[in-house]
Amino acid sequence: KAMTFPCYRWLIGDTKVEIREGTAKTLMEDSAGRLLAHRKAELQERQKTYRWITWAKGIPRCVDAKTEADLPQDVRFDNEKRSDFEHSLHYALLELSLKKLTITFGKSWSDLDDFRRIFWKLRSPIAEYVMEHWQEDWLFGYQCLNGSNPRMIQKCSKLPENFPVTADMVQSSMGERRTLDKELKAGNIYLLDYAIMDGLPTNTIKGKPQYIAAPLCLMYQHPDDGLLPIAIQLDQSPGLNTPIFLPKDPPLAWLLAKIWVRHSEFQIFQVSSHLLRTHLVSEVFCVATLRQLPAVHPIYKLLAPHLRYTLEINCRARNQLISPNGIFKRVVSTGGEGLLVLAQRDYKQLTYRSLQPHCDFSDRGVCQLPNYFHRDHSLMLWEAIQSFVSGMVSLYYQTDQDVQKDSELQAWVRDISQEGFADLPNFGLPSQLISREELSTLLAVALFTSTVQHAATNNGQFDWCAWVPNTPCSMRLPPPEDKDAVTMEMIMASLPDVSQSCVQMAITWHLGRAQPDAIPLGQYTEEHFTEVRALEMIDQFRGKLKEIEEHILNQNAGLDLQYLFLLPSRIENSITI
Ligand code: OYP
């Protein structure tokens, strides 16, 4: 193959400079004076173009652009992407507002089956499955592992003090000869704790207050029936008005308690797992890379394909989704101040460790859980990414000293840790890289977050949120205080109304559907690298991904509920939606 692509170009004064030479070069290798001057000029230009800004205090910093129109052409959507993005959303909102009309002028909104009248059947076998089975306890448990927010579940070896579940309460969920105490010791008890939602400011929508709870939910890994919810408390403080809901309670009371947990899931899922921990984290890598690495730098070449369209989609999200009049404000319980406070609380606890999947799973104590496909696929993909990037690093850095001496690289990591993740003393990313291993880990985190982790949270959102009662975006009544007083009327008056539900379906479809112009993980359409060894490593990486693809397909063959969100061919190379 002929490799004659210009590998970098920029403007010095009015002169466009193009170097027709493909070899990636770190600073030390680039010794000729003229080239050094070019590197410097390119970076000065880039730092003028891409500047950090604090959009809101207490969350990662981002690119300085009021709207996507302020971004340089190089990082904007191309025409096809823009028109698809705008049309698909309008199409969805229009389609659903028609459905809404038929309800507003038709029958009342009084029964769970009424959600069927607005449900959008769109080739999502999972969404249809959810519609039929969402009330079953095992599906509630399954979603903790393989739904769209698979990072909430954690091992519980001792009951939290504010969650006074007794052996008696859960005996019937465990079966004979088993006790809560024994199962705690055996490591079969897990917990969902939404303490982070306690006291969040709540939204008011069309004059009506919305409600938020901070539940605790105890889970049991049953030897035959899988992971099951066995006790739910909807507030962090126990008390007379804070009953502990149980599977043996009146069915509507238990159902409403589960719905409340799922409502918390929606908030954590979208604000923390999706927005903060993928979109905003990747934007930090993106801005630092554009500011600190010249296009000829091997690390720039390695990262560039994983940063495509991320700045524009994030600008759009800041302007239309989480802005003062955005979609969240119009339909979600954390709309307005709530989502910001939630993001800020979660940002405070964000660690570099938690962005590395093997650490995250082991810190949560979930390595033994059976049928945790999300975990198994994540680890396989992490391994593939990690070995790819460390191979590339060792191509361009012969020793650890080479890493220490690369002042561009060091400025890059300083930009990430000091500018992007500012005010985060416990984040855990050093502001200097001293070894090739440290560099490889950081690159693996950047790649993994913008590809695998984003796919894991983004790709399932229509499947798991289209049936609104399964993952409601808001609640319109406070949590129930009396188990015996729960009625269907109360459930319907708590769940989102018709128009909130329609918007939830439209947006989750818009974001979760397969993107028409997607570039899948490991496909490098622009030939940044031209060296034979680098190209071989890319090939090896693709080979691994192909094996993973086949493994996942075989594993899923014949399953009613398939876990395909981490199929490599369905993972995008960057966050573009
Ligand atoms: C940007 O015209 C994005 O209103 C989506 O978000 C939707 C718009 C703008 C609205 C455009 C318009 C892209 C990227 C992102 C992200 C992370 C958080 C996603 C939360 C989705 C929540 C859906 C809520 C529905 C009730």
Image: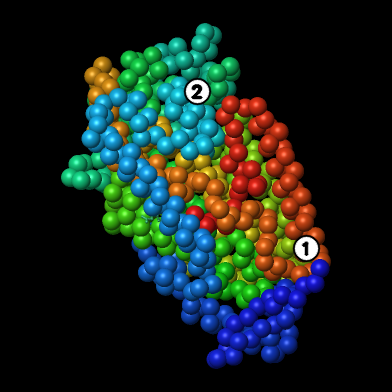
Dividing the picture into quadrants, the one containing residue 67 is bottom left
Q: Which residue is mark 1?
A: 535
- Which residue lies most toward the top here? 176
Alpha carbons under labels 2 and 1: distance apart: 46 Å
Residue sitting nearer the eye, 351 or 5:
5
Label 2 Cα crowd, 10 Å radius (few <14 / some 14-19 / many 20+):
some
Could you tell me which residue is drawn at 30 percent across and 39 percent down?
Answer: 100
Q: Is residue 315 above or below residue 357?
A: below
Residue 544: x and y in percent read: 75, 48
Residue 74: x and y in percent read: 54, 72
Question: Is residue 310 among what the camera can see?
Answer: no
Residue 436 located left or right of residue 158: right
Amino acid of disc 1: Leu
Q: Quick check: is the Cβ at mark 1 less than 8 Å away from ligand 1?
A: no
Q: Quick check: is the Cβ at mark 2 less than 8 Å away from ligand 1?
A: no
Residue 379 located left or right of residue 429: right
Which label sits in the foreground, 2 or 1? 1
Question: Is residue 138 among what the camera can see?
Answer: yes
Amino acid of disc 2: Trp
Residue 212: x and y in percent read: 30, 39
Image mark count: 2
Q: Secondary structure at mark 1?
A: helix
- Which residue lies most toward the left here? 207
Q: Secondary structure at mark 2?
A: helix
Could you tell me which residue is drawn at 75 percent across and 43 percent down?
Answer: 547
Q: Which residue is mark 2?
A: 138
The image's colour scheme reads rainbow
Q: Quadrant of the N terminus?
A: bottom right
